[in-house]
Image (cartoon, rainbow, N blue to C red):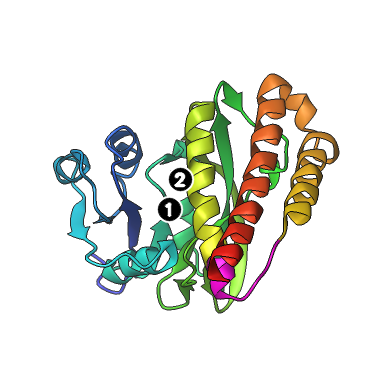
Amino acid sequence: MDINKEIPPKLSCVLIVKNEAHNIARCLNALGWANEIIVLDTGSTDNTAELCKNLGAKLFYLDNWEGFGKAKQAAVELAQYPWVLSIDADEVVSPELQQAIQTTINKADSYVGYRIKRSTWFITRWIKHCGWDKDYPLRLFRKDSGAFTPDLVHESIKVSGRVGILQEPLLHYSYPSLEQHQTRLIFYGRLWAEEQQRKGKQSSISSAIFHSIWKFISMYFWQKGWLDGKAGLLLSISSAFSVYYKHVRLWELQQKSR
């Protein structure tokens, strides 16, 4: 044995969950190659926690909810290895992405984080347009060089150093039905409005209408959502409604504060 041989870097996969029993097995089964899987439960009332334990994850519980950004950073801080992959319960690491990640973290380069191409399933098909083809969230990073922003919603990872790109797909099964998509968008819209109000931002009914129309035109025409067929049309309409709702919700909060 070569005692001078460098030990390959190790990877921690981290995720936060709440009532994800319908998703979690598919997600965790694709992470068996990781050195550890950290799951932070934020208040599940189904059997998510039991499934996580049975599938080999290290399970922890969050006592105080302060938004997605702080919860995800709390999960990161539980990781013990230098590289961290942050994913959601409705996402799956493809075999190609697994190989790319393992190859990447073993390279001696100066990158401290990587954006990963995300492919999203919406109702009946993988969306190839509507702007979703340009979805490259930063998910793989060195723990000593990156952290989540503390945002209530729409959190992101910020790193101090060079960022690369992995083209192998992270599969996102977020929206199996239009109803679930709308429910999720309304939930995020409420959080967005609350955060914007705290920042002193304002909105109006006319602004809500303008931004929603612009959203539809941008997704369906400029970003060629029409090429995704009926799914692209439904996604563009649904997203436009989401923009309308969050601006109206912010306007409503303004009225109540007065």
Name the residue located 27 percent from the left edge and 56 percent from the top edge: 42
* Residue bearing mark 1: 102
Q: 210 or 171: which is nearer to us? A: 210
Q: Which residues are magenta?
A: 195-203
Res 99 label: 2
Q: Do labels 1 and 2 touch, CB within 8 Å?
A: yes
Q: How many marks?
A: 2
Name the residue located 36 percent from the left edge and 68 percent from the top edge: 66
Q: Where's residue 203, x and y in %?
A: 70, 62
Name the residue located 58 percent from the left edge and 77 percent from the top edge: 161
Name the side, left or right, on which 223 lies relative to 43.
Answer: right
Name the amino acid type tagged 2.
Gln
Residue 222 vs 257, above or below: the answer is above
Name the amino acid type tagged 1.
Gln
SS for callout 1: helix
Q: Residues within 10 Å of mark 2 (few under 14, many from 20)?
A: few
Q: Where's residue 98, x and y in %?
A: 43, 45
